[in-house]
Amino acid sequence: MSTQLRDVVLLVEHDRALAQSIRRALRSRFDVIVVDSATAAMEAVSSRSFVCALVEESLVSGSGLELAARIKLERPGMLVTLLAAELDNETMITASALGIQVADKHDLPEIDHVLLAMATRPAGL
């Protein structure tokens, strides 16, 4: 019997209830690894491969945008999405300039849509 490997998503979220909701929403198509700090996220990115990182904008351990930028620098080909309840224009412009997508962290269909778009994009984009 062959075992098909599933794509793995890194979720950086300190709110356990929200992290579980997002994990449940994605688990039919992805394995989801949840960490709650920038340090744990960078350790995970350094040690394994992910198709995407979903990063909470306001982490307890620092700026989610800064972490997203560090992940993008470490893994330029990885889709990185900043999850936020509200974002100011400056943050959205900065995220866009860095190649980081933005999604509403409470809108599970939007998060799913971002990942579906990633899964159907041509290789190398």
Image (cartoon, rainbow, N blue to C red):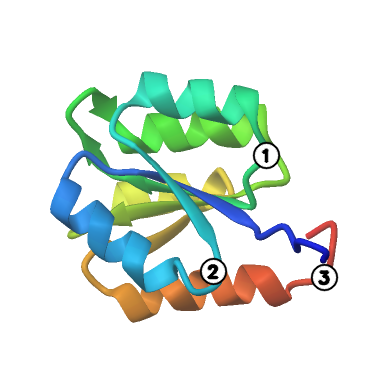
Tell me the quarter of the image containing the C terminus: bottom right
- Identify whether 104 is placed above or below 46: below
User: Can residue 88 be seen in the rendering of this structure?
Assistant: no
- Looking at the image, tell me whether mark 3 or mark 1 is earlier in sequence order: 1
- At horizontal 82% and vertical 66% (from top left) the residue drawn is 1
Question: Which tag is nearer the camera, tag 1 or tag 2?
Answer: 1
Q: Depth check: 45 or 123 in front? A: 45
Residue 71 picture location, percent across and down: 55, 32
Q: Which mark is residue 49?
A: 1
- Looking at the image, tell me whether mark 3 or mark 2 is earlier in sequence order: 2
Task: Name the residue type under label 2.
Answer: Leu
Task: Name the residue type under label 1.
Answer: Ser
Task: Name the residue type under label 3.
Answer: Pro
Measure how far apart labels 3 and 1 are at the Cα level: 18 Å
10 sits left or right of 83 in the view: right
- Tag 2 residue: 115
Dot 2: few (<14), some (14–19), or many (≥20) neighbours within 10 Å?
A: many
- Identify whether 1 is placed above or below 110: above
Measure how far apart labels 1 and 2 are at the Cα level: 16 Å
